[in-house]
Amino acid sequence: MVRAFEAATRQAAANLQPAEVAQVNGRPDPPLTFHRRVQVADLGEITCYYGFVVDEQERPDCSHVVRAALRALAGGRVFPVNAVEFDDQEQPLPSEGPSPLPIPEPWYLPPAADELAQGLFFRTLEGRPLGSIVRFPSHPSICGGSNRPHSGDYPAYVRRRAEEVFGGVGVFLTGPCGDQICPIGRRSLELAERIGIRVADTVLGGLAEADWQAEAGVAVASPEVELRIREDYPESREAARRERDEIESAFREAVRGGAGLAELKHMSDRYEFLTWVVDTQDGHRVWTGVDPCGRAGQVISHPLFLLRVGESVLAGLPGEPFGGLSAALRRDTIGERLIVLEEANGYLGYFPGAADYPRGGYEVTAALFGPESEEALRDAVRRALPALGV
């Protein structure tokens, strides 16, 4: 893999030539990304991955996903349920029993904080297309089950559409979407294709009015950000395993004793966090390359990636921040000329906002760093922009 990337880099460098660049921004209508965390009474937040009932306006109703999660919790399942599968007739598979709490129906996912589709297009000075970059902030999780090993999900269809309509080589980059998801009912390749084409067409449709720059300067920066490992991280995987076993036993006792859902949800959140520590091939260590056990509260320095191309700036963050981070950065800096990306320059897990940590849910239980981390990322990008000449 390293050799393949090195060869591609050399080939790209050998093909360098003068070019024009244009940026296009747009928002799919109706929207194609939504906030996937919902607040349930006083329990905290539940994450909904997929299995929504999508209405004619393409609004995802998550009510039956939430009911399934609450039934599982009240029924004694300590690891959370976050999705519902569909049958071949496009109907959600039923979960047995009444909901332990009244759930509104329909319950539509809230709008995403960041729903912006952005494109950078490149052509020679003679007008021949060289390629494109399209950025969209939503999890590529539309294909599931047996489809997953065989598909690049909706980003593959974004790239294909951009290459077909504009030309050249298409590149897709994911914007911060730690808490954002497409309106996914039954997962399928067909749905991935449909959403990918719509994302691409959102930016391709603005090309006719695009402002092409022939004198587009380039600048780069790689500021360091300091990230603090969360204070509640276990001393060792063995300690995490012991605590998890204790929680599982206490959870069963709490269910038998008629404990409230808020107490069960709190225990379930901690159990899930400990599962990422000890299972899934030592989740955090394998995902990030960092071994955090015994390092609670320690600070890690990590380089970010910023690239200015003409008036546009790409800012890459090393994990999965929430959509609100990119929306805030655009608002506080150079507006829609800023293209914020995730999973760039490495991968360091989820970055919820500080207010999200007490609410729990998957993104919080999968986070390696503490609640101040999102603001640290935001500050690092803001400080670096002047060095790029913007």
Image: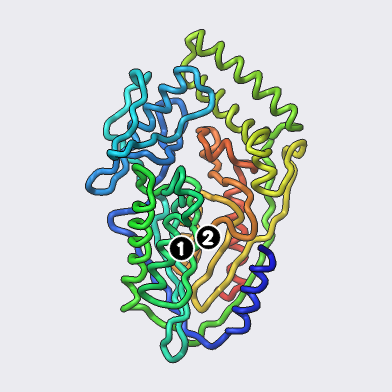
Q: Quadrant of residue 115?
A: bottom left
Find the residue positioned furthest to the left.
56
Q: Residue 368 location in percent, x, y?
A: 64, 42
The part of the image, by quadrant, that contains residue 242 is: top right
> Who's the residue at 58% across and 71% down the image?
307
Q: Which residue is mark 2?
A: 341
Outermost top residue: 257
In terms of secondary structure, where does tag 2 sit?
strand
Q: Quadrant of the N terminus?
A: bottom right
Work out whether residue 180 can be spotted: no
Residues at marks 2 and 1 touching, judged by CB atoms closer than 8 Å? yes
Q: Is residue 154 visible?
A: yes
Q: CA distance from mark 2 to mark 1?
A: 8 Å
Left-right relation of 144 to 226: left
Give the quadrant of the C terminus.
bottom right
Residue toward you, 171 or 189: 189
Q: Nearer the viewer, residue 163 or 252?
A: 163
Crowd class of label 1 (few under 14; some 14 to 19; many from 20; radius 10 Å): many
Per the image, the residue denoted by label 1 is 135
Q: Amino acid at mark 1?
A: Arg
Q: Give the residue displayed 41% in from the left and 33% down from the top.
A: 39
Sequence-first tag of 2 and 1: 1
Residue 38 position (above or below residue 383): above
Q: Secondary structure at mark 1?
A: strand
> Is 87 positioned to the left or the right of 384 in the image?
left
In the rendered image, residue 313, in percent from the top left (x then y), is placed at 53, 70
Left or right: 386 with respect to 148?
A: right
Residue at x 44% of width, y 23% of height: 72
Specify the quadrant of the image occupied by residue 284.
Answer: top right
The amino acid at mark 2 is Leu
Of 299 and 270, nearer the camera is 270
Q: How many marks?
A: 2
